Image (cartoon, grey):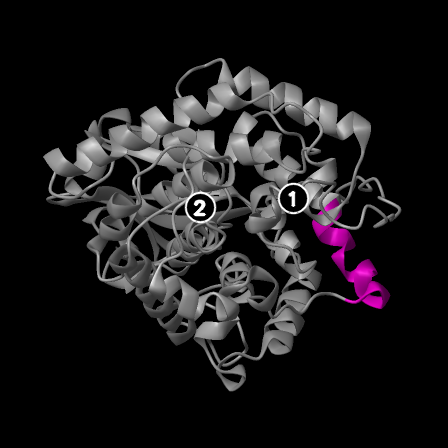
Amino acid sequence: MRQSHQLPLLGLLLFSLIPSQLCTICEVSKENYSRLYPLINTIINSKYTKGIQAANVLLSLKLVGIWNQNIEQQLIQQIHDNEENKDLTSGQLALVLLALGACQSSEETFPYSYLVSQLEKKFQAEIKNMEIHHGNPLTNYYQLSLGVLALCLFNGKYSITEVTKLFTPENKNFYFGGQFSVDTGAMAVLALTCVKRRIVNKQIETDEENFKHINDHINSLVKKILSEKKENGLIGNIFSTGEAMQALFVSSNYYNKNEWNCQQTLDTVLKEISREVFHMPTAAAQILPALMGKTYLDVNKNSSCGSGNFNISIQEPVPVVPTSSPSNISVHYSVQINETYSTNITVPTGSVFLDVMQEAQKMNETVFRFTVVESSWGPYITSVQGLEANNNDRSYWELLSEGKAVSQGVGSYVVHNGENLEVRWSKY
């Protein structure tokens, strides 16, 4: 694309927006690398049967400079296998592109241009759907942001004017059930920062108004992210904190130092790691880059990402032999649509929400039947009693425990004896 002439506004802001001056980063010290072992063991020793999980893992490993040829070849093959299914969403395709294209040498010919072209088409399909269905994308704004980020990093085609309109911070798609979505906002900050840097570096052209909008959007989104900071330093919840850290790393000129204690956040996350909170590969893969001071904006550096010398001994998990037969627990399970259908379910100790739903379906398929698809975060409920979740009308199946939304997915939330579980038809 033709370089633009330097704009007056850009000239005024150029010095303050040079990327090297944008980042304030805290990261785990070498002395504490051993505290990351549980994360890395989860990432490397888990079995990856789904290509999108493999993409998350490969991207994370590349960014932090952990390299294992066998693992990388295995993950790349799984990603290619999934890619051939031709049914990836825009965000999933963007993640595949980020993972495969990360850390390419500047001397190499970029072999994934066809993925960029496919992503351009999927991004436009999202825009078209929003025009038809009251501003609702085919997927969600997290995936839309991921798509813009990948297109920006790999020189794809997108309209800056369109992006500035899409990412107005008050847009309903940044909210879920009335609550600001931290990870969605964080991904938008990363995407907008990428676009802004390319404008500043005169790699793409725009007018002063669009540039000002981008700057204002980042500023507003950063404030919203910081407003979700908890007393212990977590931002949103434990699973959104990693991407929030990335967003704050690249936007430190939008907030004061006393507004975020990065070290406190880091210390709290390390404590959560010791409690084995990040037992899912995707959760572990998403938090690891931030802990090593990396962001998704490091993807297109013209050399190996990370230091390349993060050599650790990965321990094989030790199988646990049960000393006795597992005990059972009883839970109360309900499905709520226009009326409520309930039953009591007995499952083994350690079962997850999905196990309860499967047992209920066996008892009464008419009332408790459901469908599920695999996502990067594991199983996702798409329908119950034939009623399907639909992005066009912002409907979904909400998982609740004791009347409150659970913070984990159906395949990872471990249920407890006497718990009241509910699947509710909801809108966001």
Seen from the viewer's position, the closer of residues 88 and 420 is 88
Q: Is residue 262 left or right of residue 418?
A: right
| Corner quadrant of residue 73 | top right
The mark that comes first in sequence, 1 or 2, is 1
Q: Which residues are magenta?
A: 29-40
Say if the magenta span includes residue 30: yes
Q: Residues within 10 Å of mark 1 (few under 14, many from 20)?
A: some
Name the disc covering residue 301, or none: 1
Q: Amino acid at mark 1?
A: Lys
> For the residue labelled by badge 1, is the local secondary structure a helix, a strand or a loop?
loop
Mark 1 or 2, which is nearer the eye? 1
- Residue visible at 25% across and 47% down in the picture: 161
Residue 256 x, y percent position in the rendering: 49, 82
Instruction: Identify residue for label 2.
Output: 409
Q: Which quarter of the figure is the N terminus placed in? A: top left
Q: Amino acid at mark 2?
A: Gly
Name the disc covering residue 321, or none: none
Quick one: which residue is furthest to the front in this view?
5
Residue 334 x, y percent position in the rendering: 27, 46
- Residue visible at 49% across and 44% down in the picture: 352
Residue 68 x, y percent position in the rendering: 81, 34
Q: Residues within 10 Å of mark 2 (few under 14, many from 20)?
A: some
Q: Is residue 48 left or right of residue 423?
A: right
